[in-house]
Image (tube, rainbow, N blue to C red):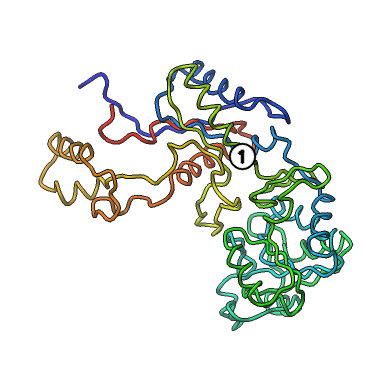
Amino acid sequence: MSTKERFTGTISRGIRCPIIREGDDLAQIVSDSVLKAAEGEGFELRDRDVIAVTESIVARAQGNYATVENIAKDVREKLGGGTIGVIFPILSRNRFAICLRGISMGAKKVVLMLSYPSDEVGNELVSLDQLDAAGVNPYSDVLTLEKYRELFGENRHPFTGVDYVAYYEGLIRECGAEPVILFANQAKAILDFADCILTCDIHTRRRTKRILKDAGAKVVLGLDDILNAPVDGSGYNENYGLLGSNKSTEDKVKLFPRASQDLVLNIQKRILEACGKHVEVMVYGDGAFKDPQGKIWELADPVVSPFHTEGLIGTPNELKLKYLADNDYKDLSGEALKEAISESIRKKDSDLKGSMASQGTTPRQLTDLIGSLCDLTSGSGDKGTPVVLVQGYFDNYTND
């Protein structure tokens, strides 16, 4: 047996870093942390390793924060400060509640229209079985709060224990606005109650805006249009506004990072200068995966990776080994099978799209796949590993 034979494939390592503060030299900290980890743990960096940096520390180093007062001022100036229709938000204390606080402070009346049976990312208000039992058609029926309570009572989130309907209603009232709660999935339904609309969906926002504008709404904005420029010196995100923001304190949000392409290129350059290896670098947020138990789709950020080096553009180009083993080489075994499959990999086309031998491989962007791996590796709690090193991701069965 060759001493060079490898027995492992892709390896994902969480890299511990110092606590990041505003103004820190993040490129240096990330590069130094990865290099120290390699030295301390006894592994070597290789070409095409991926260094992934969570968006949270990028935004923190940038000082990209805004207060609820900043949000309120922007909402008031852009939507008039009277009655505002706020539609299709996700159910989240971390992601949306703090935004709703600022929105409500910028209005006299908030007509909050929630999608049902769940929000965009799968947080459930009622079950499909409950809708069936009540004879409710979620595609057409508009429910008032009173009708919702009559049919379904109180429904607490299975993980957080929060009744988000009551929570959001109370939050609007606490901020000095009059709350009206509706349940509907047709965007146009809000126009019976308000004509200045703030649509809060994430991945469907462009379609929702188009539908509302075509239906004659006076003003249509999305969360991406709020804080897309500084307000009284606040942070901002020119592309995503409030999308991708997280609660920082009870009256402040951390926004999605901006203008960070230079950061990933700087980290790539530092690693090349330090050890001669050409690594890929990305900033990542939520992974794009769905929890089978809670039915929650993780992706509450507008994209998985807002910034990445050029080598992470594209999709995997892989053969399905079990397809080759069960079909093309079904009569082979042992070393003969291994060599036949290895030869197929070495000679594979540069674009396998449509090939039967590639069916069943994951047809997703590299940044979405690697970002999901990194999000699961780093977690969102107290692991203290906001940087992830992925090794061997671009290797295949033939690499030693």
Viewer-closest of 132 and 189: 189
Quadrant into which the N terminus falls: top left
Using the rendered view, name the quadrant where residue 305 is placed. Answer: top right
* Furthest residue toward left: 331
Q: Residue 106's spot in the image, x, y percent?
A: 84, 59
Using the rendered view, name the quadrant where residue 223 is placed. Answer: bottom right
Q: Residue 366's spot in the image, x, y percent?
A: 43, 44
* Furthest residue toward right: 176
* Horizontal side, residue 315 vs residue 24: left or right: left
Q: Residue 89's spot in the image, x, y percent?
A: 68, 62
Q: Residues within 10 Å of mark 1 (few under 14, many from 20)?
A: many
The secondary structure type at the circle numbered 1 is helix
- Which residue type carries mark 1? Glu
Viewer-closest of 125 and 56: 56
Quadrant into which the C terminus falls: top left
Viewer-closest of 15 and 304: 304
Q: Is residue 276 above or below residue 145?
A: above
To which residue does mark 1 refer?
A: 55
* Horizontal side, residue 47 vs residue 219: left or right: left
Q: Is residue 104 above or below residue 325?
A: below
Residue shown at the point (56%, 57%) measured from the top left? 296
Residue shown at the point (41%, 45%) measured from the top left? 314
Viewer-closest of 178 and 3: 178
Q: Residue 45's spot in the image, x, y percent?
A: 43, 22
* Horizontal side, residue 368 vs residue 302: left or right: left
Numbered marks: total: 1
